[in-house]
Image (tube, rainbow, N blue to C red):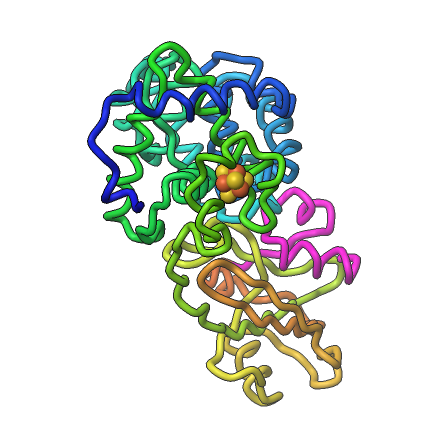
Amino acid sequence: MSFSSLPSTTPDSYSWFAEALLAWYPRHRRDLPWRHTHDPYLIWLSEVILQQTRVKQGLPYYKTFSTAYPTVQALAAAPPDEVLRHWQGLGYYSRARNMHYTAQQVVAEFGSQFPDSYAGLLKLKGVGQYTAAAVASFAYDERVAVLDGNVFRVLARVFGQHHDIAAPASRKLFQQLADQLIPADQPAEFNQAIMEFGALQCTPAKPDCMFCPLQSRCFAFQHGLVAELPVKSKAKVARTRYFHYLVLRHADTVYLRKRGPKDIWEGLYDFALHETDAPELPGADLLAAVEQLGGRVATDQVEEPAVAARHVLSHQKVEALFHEIWLAAPLPATATSAGLAAYRSREIEQLPKSILITNYISKKEI
Ligand code: SF4
């Protein structure tokens, strides 16, 4: 049986599913801070932080943000660099920028009150169906089913769904199914339960089928298809980029610049960058790149070998080489057109940076 062949039915026909999850949940759930609140701001904050992030990794960030910015007004008023600095290490930095923007929108357009319905929450920039459903159900107990990776997996396995979960068209089908399953009297508890069940019991690899309360009803288990479901088409192969960082130093300062829009790490600070199509950068090209910035440098002032580092993102791989270069004189004022400015060590510490840059700085004790 596949989902497309499921008989049309009333929600009661599937009540066994909700009953099993609601019995499982109180015995297995993790004690997490955002489960003790109905404050839509804190719930939204936790959901933004946990997107594409494991609970263990996201937890300290939730604590940092909820302490530094206990209200949506506090977050909205925070300087952008400070928000990025707190986010440092969590990746997908556009999430931090969107989060900040959404907080400002809530303050400016909604009188600092989060909209109190699923439909209203969807009007916020950067709030998609998943986040709106999570906030609406956890904060307001609205009966709207959440669909995240965990929920997709549980539904695909239990109900024998073979639709590609990476295809946008599949979302509607899974949503229809989830909407049939969610009970009217405990929507928030059900949503928490199914996500937690996917995170702890019906895991991507090695799900605990032997001790699963859904085993006798689970299509994937009964048909030996646990490893095959859910179906997910492969993401595009990541492209490789070659970053040659010119770590320009003079006296006790290092030159950094803020990264611009339309590329990775927008708003974060890094060094002067020379990107190439090949891994190597000949010495003459390196010196020419420094001279283009107005830098005067002697060949023996370029530290050898350059420090290599790799950073893998979802759609691209960065192969970085850090060329540490001691300048004979400070960069001329024209270098500011490339956004470069000289910073001392203590100032650099306060700037938001990618993990790639942070690791290099701590390794070199800049
Ligand atoms: S039997 Fe296995 S695959 Fe099926 S719901 Fe339980 S843990 Fe998931």
**Magenta residues (range):** 340-366
Q: Residue at x 62, y 68 (%)?
A: 310
Please tell me which residue lies in front, 343 or 117: 117
Out of 86 and 299, give the one closest to the viewer. 86
| Residue positioned 29% across, 27% down in the render | 179
Q: Is residue 356 above or below residue 160?
A: below
- Is 10 on the left or on the right of 63, as rendered? left
Residue displayed at 64% across by 58% down: 357
Looking at the image, how many numbered discs can be counted on the residues?
Answer: 0
The vertical placement of 343 against 111, above or below, is below
The image quadrant of residue 285 is: bottom right
Q: Is residue 361 left or right of residue 244?
A: right
* Viewer can see residue 316: yes
Q: Position of residue 148 (x, y in %)?
A: 42, 38
Q: Give the x, y percent position of residue 202.
A: 54, 40
Q: Report whether residue 73 is seen.
A: no
For the C terminus, the quadrant is bottom right
Judge whether 71 appears above or below 246 on screen: above
| Residue 110, position as x, y percentages in the image | 30, 16
Quadrant of the image containing the N terminus:
top left
Occupied quadrant, residue 4: top left
At which x and y percent is residue 86?
Answer: 60, 37
- Residue 364 on the magenta span: yes
Looking at this view, name the residue that lies furthest to the left.
Answer: 8
- Queried whether the magenta region covers residue 246, the answer comes back as no
